[in-house]
Image: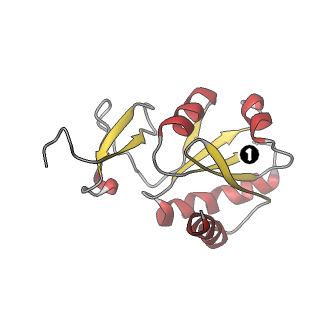
Amino acid sequence: MTAATRATRQIVCPHCTKTNRVPVDRPMSAARCGACHRPLFDGHPAAVDAAAFDRHRRNNDIPILVDVWAPWCGPCRAMAPMFERAVTELEPDVRLLKLNSDEEPRIAAELGVRGIPALFLIHRGRVVAQSAGAQEASRIVAWVRAQMASA
């Protein structure tokens, strides 16, 4: 198979938001961004603004899990370390993002956020599942895996 015909997945860099083509026959966990040369998966959720969120939603071939939160929200702060732990089990199959609803009210409104913290599983640009309320890491992982298995 030539490089021109090799099957690839599009993965958005969490650092510079450039879209990368990663060959499907290579481990995604070792992939680096062609633009900024940083790892595409670094074991941490990526904080995003509206532009970065839109880029991830449009260009990632893998599902994205978005934690919509606010700094004044006690349950959001309590869930933050749980969301951070979930990354270790979900990457590189799922990109985890954090979106501050106070800084990005347009995106929160588009998603239909009614309470925070709120989780949105998005694949191919559309919301496939959502959940509200603080959750333990194991519950987040189980919920995502169940949603992906039924999709």
The quarter of the displayed image where residue 22 is located: top left
Residue 51 pos. (x, y %): 58, 26
Q: Residue furthest left?
A: 2
Q: On the rendered structure, is 108 left or right of 13?
A: right
Mark 1 closeness class: few <14, some 14–19, many ≥20 residues within 10 Å: many
Q: Is residue 112 above or below residue 28?
A: above
Residue 57 pos. (x, y %): 56, 39
Residue 91 pos. (x, y %): 45, 58
Q: Is residue 52 above or below residue 3?
A: above
The quarter of the displayed image where residue 102 is located: top right
Residue holding disc 1: 69
Q: Which quadrant holds the C terminus?
A: bottom right
Q: Is residue 83 above or below residue 108?
A: below
Q: Residue at x 76, y 35 (%)?
A: 110
Q: Residue at x 62, y 70 (%)?
A: 146
Q: On the rendered structure, is 97 left or right of 119?
A: left
Q: On the rendered structure, is 20 left or right of 125?
A: left
Amino acid residing under circle 1:
Trp
